[in-house]
Amino acid sequence: MPISRREFLKGMGVVAGSTGIALSGSQRLIPYLIQPEEIVPGVSTWYATSCRECPAGCGMVVRNRESRAVKCEGNPIHPIAQGTLCSRGQAALQGLYNPDRIPSPKRRNPNGSYTDVSWDKAISSVADVLAAGKRIAIITDLQSGSLGTLMQAWLSAFGSDRFLMYEPVNYESAKRAFGGVIPSLNIAGSDCIVSFGCDFLETWVSPIEYAHAFTRMRRVVNGTRGRFIYVGPRISMTAAKADIRVIVPPGAEVAVASVLKGGSAGGVADKYGLDINTLTEAAGLVAGSRSLLALPGWTAASAQAALEMNTTGASALIDTTRPHAVSKLAAESDMRALIDDMNAGLVDVLIVIGANPVYGMPKSSGFDKALELVPNVISMTNYMDETSALAHWLLPSNTPLESWGDYEPYPDVRNLIQPTTGQPFNTRDTGDILMELADKAGVNRTAVFKAANYYEFLRARWNQPVGASDTAWEELLRRGGVWPGSSRGTPSLPSTGYNTLADFQYYDGPPSAPSPMPASEMEATGLGTARAVQAGTAISNKPSSKKLKNIIYPHTYLYDGRGANRSWLQENPEPVTKIVWHAWAEINPGTASELDVNTGDMIRISLGKESVELPVYVWRGVALGVIATPTGQGHSGYGQFADDTGDNILKLSGPGVRTVSVSKLGNSIWLPRIKGSHHQNDRDIVQTTPIDKPAHRAKPIIMPLPEGYTKRDFYPPHKYAVHRWAMVVDLNKCIGCHACVTACYAENNLATVGPTEIWRRREMSWVRIDRYFDWDHPAAPIVFQPMLCQHCDAAPCEPVCPVFAASHSDEGLNMQVYNRCVGTRYCSNNCPYKVRRFNWYDYKWPEPLNWQLNPDVTVRCRGVMEKCTFCIQRIREAEIVAKREGRKVRDGDITPACVGTCPTGVYVFGDLKDKNSRVSRLIADDPRAYQVLQNLNTKPAVIYLKQIIG
Amino acid sequence: MVETDTPKAMETVDDIVIDSLGKPSIGYIAAVGLFVFLVIVGIVAYIFQYYIGMGVTGLSIPIAWAVYITNFVFWIGIAHAGTLISAILFLFRTSWRNRINRAAETMTIFAIVTAGLFPLIHLGRVWVFWWLIPYPNWRHLWPNFKSPLIFDVIAVTTYLVVSTLFFYLGLLPDIATVRDRTDKGWRKSMYTFFALGWTGEYDQWRHFARSYLALAALVTPLVISVHSVVSWDFAMALLPGWHSTIFAPYFVAGAIHSGLAMVITLLVPLRKALRLERLLTPYYFEQIALLTVLTGSILAYSYMVEGFMAWYSGDIFERQFAAYRALHSPVYATLFWVVVVCNTFVPMTFLARGLRKNLTYVFIAAILINVGMWLERFVIITGSLSHDFLPSSWALYAPRIVEILVTLFSAGLFFGTVIVFVKLFPSIPMSEAKEELLPEEVEHV
């Protein structure tokens, strides 16, 4: 984008760094009476920054339109996310425009009410407290860049060193497996991964980075691929992708590890009720592996198991000299030491920045009680939360999308954070608040920080890698930071990422000349048919009483609870259970019958004096005698989207395993989830192909082109002059992470409807991830299938619409003309894929959440049908750009939102009229290609590639 | 054959019928009050839906059609018996139709009007409903003639127009008779207006007879076509349980079945309320009951063919769906067997002479058939939508309060308009009833 951003960025720096110009109120952001030069209405500006929604630190680019941030996507040149972004990262936008943000500084009165105060008054009052020379402590979320440095310098200026980086998910156990740090892991370089309950594709440390590596590792080369064994108490989304799942009760991991390393399987299998064949087979895979990597999960036993496994030759894959930032997180013991001090009256001022320990710490730690003993609690956060509610002063800080800053996920990967939008609220950068406070409290700001504001402080710290020149700095901002090889590659708009045709090639030759691996070789390398333990079959150590082992794991989207105030994340179905908007407890049907509970029945989980009440979700993916509970829900006072979502398991303990007592409560709730059948019912919708046999097409693809029509067809074919858009979906790559779903919500202004409406089956997602269980098929007991409008050529929705609202474009899209739709809903009835969504109401976006809306896409009114458009606005944009540049649209120019954000490159989008496009070649060459419900002769333009198993 | 307590004189026919237009009883007023109440409550419920959105219903994706479309099909079906009795049986010279055809036609007209509201009630954006109507406009925007919904619009409006004409034509001589026997007041003016100057001259009777025959011939194919078109709403879709070639005859037979049952349901109480016992003898009900044996048999055959074809097709979707609807689904399997019993077993009992001569029994059986026919459409519509191609979409449906109130509204509207009408206009075609009298009966006077 040939727009000079020099002046604009300077201006932004001044806005962010100075004191008087902060914008407030929803009216002032736009419109302009005199339009700034840099802003061209209708043209997007992209700002490179770093995602701060979890510790992973993915590079992110934020799309800014008319000075509003409207979409977060991955930074294509960044090494961690490589141009993709998960659901949580995309929901950063809902953090920025959250309706429950603290709009301006507030003081809490003794009676609990709040008084709005000006920044000047707030700063000077708090500075007075600080100047009194009190003992100060800071609790912050993970900081690995300049802000952390600033905080420590700031604290030492006040003569304190009580600096704690607290997050509930602190990887304390996992660190033990790697000698005290979370190292950099070369997952792509491994040929066999053993995960001991490590959900590295969804929550563990850096999921997007690992998902990329995992996809590379699992690429089929010469008839084989990297193997993946999952040993854990529950089939998580990550476990669903494994070749072999050994579902074990927590604590059995070490014993299983010994079997995998070659120990005797019999005793372990008997003791824990495991299937001996599965164990033997897994051990065979491990024995045949040359570069095995074992990963620890949330429990100490899993860390011990990983530690023991990794002795065999994983050291080349584990780089402890390049520790991940999460290694710096405070241990729970550090927090307990601080609590002791707070109880002892040794802390006078506690500054909480972005952390929420009242929610995240176990109730038994007494943090909330101790906090009440601290005379001055100052909260610098974005939203009111459980901890801020107990603070005396609320000094609202900017969200990362409005701030200057930096973040270093690894020592050599330094991400810059820059403001990507104006400020909707009267908030400030945390760094500036701290520096102002210091200044007012009598600390010489220039002497201590060597900067007048946080922006200068930040730039000074970045002089070392890039030099002090503005040009270098601007180049840095354009790229988003510094990392090994960061000078390579051109910063560009998000595109298809690393997803090239090579990533899809399964066989080199055409289907007629398959080259299967000889059976003998398969035997030798231990690549037989994979098998998993069927949880729920006879396990001998049945719980004698209602004492169960409670595995507490971070929620796929809400993580440690910070995502709970984002409606996109609440509405995203958890990949395996499909539960939305609520906390739950998973148990095995065997355990459920002992407790006499069913899905939706409430139970009480007690640990010590504390207990939580949760609805049960019964399924076979959990080990007997285990209760699995995700964190993240059950907030009190974290905003309208987080309330009434059940109970908070973190009250009992952080992630890990605890022995709890469980009792039935007698009442039950409608556990909000995406219902529908769990099983494919022999309908062959998600198709698989074994790795050791050549894939073949049972039936040729019925092309969504004139050539796909025969005498069978009643209506004549559509003629396409220039383009025929189509998509290829590789089921083998789909890990079920729902990043595409969130991307669609963000790009296409989809409404979130809440739990009741989801119970009524009125979710609005244009693309969904269907999940099917198949317990008779142990190699793939859980499969995922992205389901979106298939843009059929003989679309059943089109002829039935009485008013042509559902019509066919001359580029092959099934269009829905909202203005023409009268709402008969006949199109949905006749859609075999049920991908159409109806506006049952006029959906509302509470202020200022409506600011996130994409200006390129209509917001639909009640009474009309809507559906996937293949992001027609992006198609048009690419076509207009191509026309302006006097060329044809090239393959890869168009990236629908789901395609661009998919971390594993499931989707390829392109033109069937172009015989050399990736979609054309995949459909022509890949023997895995098939069409869902092909027998209906709808001629879908979304072609699926079968999942490879074994 | 005409039975013994048939009135023996033309004048008696006139007297009985015209007496029925007299001062309403308390019971009659109470019934009208109940129906008006249902209508008002239904309108309030609909206004609520209009302003809030279709979300107030129990509909969802996948089940985007349910009670409203069920009501549409049900009332359209009701409308079929009237035309069948008045036109088809007229062409076949079936003499027993002559005393009941007016009631049946009245039912037809108001059933079409009631049914016609439902496509509008179920629209997401009813404020642009006129886009469904083919009318010339400078944007050259026509409706999609491929869509069965447009077939519906055309078929239903045609049916309404033709059957209204037919109905009005048959009513003309009777309005004139009532006009002549009314002294003064607004009724006199009304009858004078609607009688269109009918004097009963020979030429008028000649024109009347010819046009009545012509309209009967015109409306007869409509009986077949309208419900065939309605059935194509389903048969032309892909869904298992909808996509079936038997649907047109199956729906037509079902429509006539429910219509005949509704004639009985209406006439049994009306006969008492309007003191028409001497004209509407059990003989007529017996004839209708026997006709439902025929239609019920066609339905039984259709149910069997549906099941057989699901199995014979070898198609997994059809087979699983048939098993789901008839056996596996607790909701739909129960309803399905209620439907089978009400629509096929109940009419078969009319084969027993003693039962079909018992008016109370016939009345109860007719109500059961009505219930069965409503449920049949409900099971067809929501059952298939509940269990379509992708198992991830499967869901269940339950109606919510607005849908229930609007359904009661339709009953209120239908019954209310019918009973108000029979108080205003002769509910027995006097001229035709008189034609039917045999020469020896006339001589007897």
Image (cartoon, coloured by chain):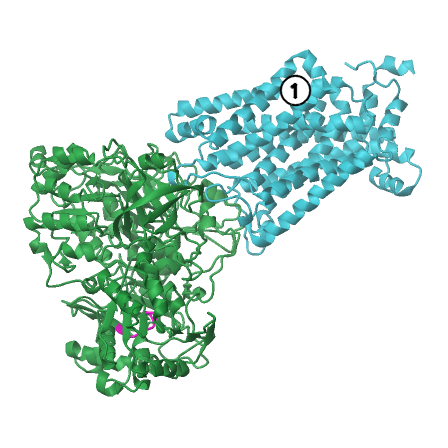
Asked if one can make out residue A761 in the rendered structure from this viewpoint, the answer is: no
Identified by mark 1, the residue type is Leu
Which residue is at the far right?
Answer: B183
- Chain B appears in which tint? cyan
Q: Residue B205: which quarter of the image?
A: top right
Locate residue A384: give its quadrant: bottom left
Which residue is rendered at x = 66% and y = 41% of the image?
B409
The quadrant of the picture occupied by the N terminus of chain A is: bottom left
Residue A421, horizontal then vertical, whole percent: 36, 72
Which chain's colour is green?
A
Foreground of the two, A150 or A625 = A625
Residue under the point 39% across and 34% down: A712
Q: Position of residue A286 (x, y in %)?
A: 10, 42
Residue that sits furthest to the front in the current view? A344
Looking at the rendered structure, the secondary structure element under dot 1 is helix
Q: Which residues are magenta?
A: A398-405
> Does the magenta-highlighted stretch encompass residue A14?
no
Q: Main secondary structure of the magenta part?
A: loop
Question: Where residue A675 appears, x then y in whole percent?
Answer: 41, 42
Seen from the viewer's position, the closer of residues B191 and A611 is A611
Side of A860 relative to A146 (left or right):
right
Which residue lies under the disc numbered 1? B291
Marked residue chain, label 1: B
**B197 with respect to B311 (left or right):** right
Q: Position of residue B270 (x, y in %)?
A: 77, 29
Q: Which quadrant of the view contains residue A511?
A: top left
Does B103 sit left or right of B232 as displayed? right
Q: Is residue A35 above or below residue B45?
A: below
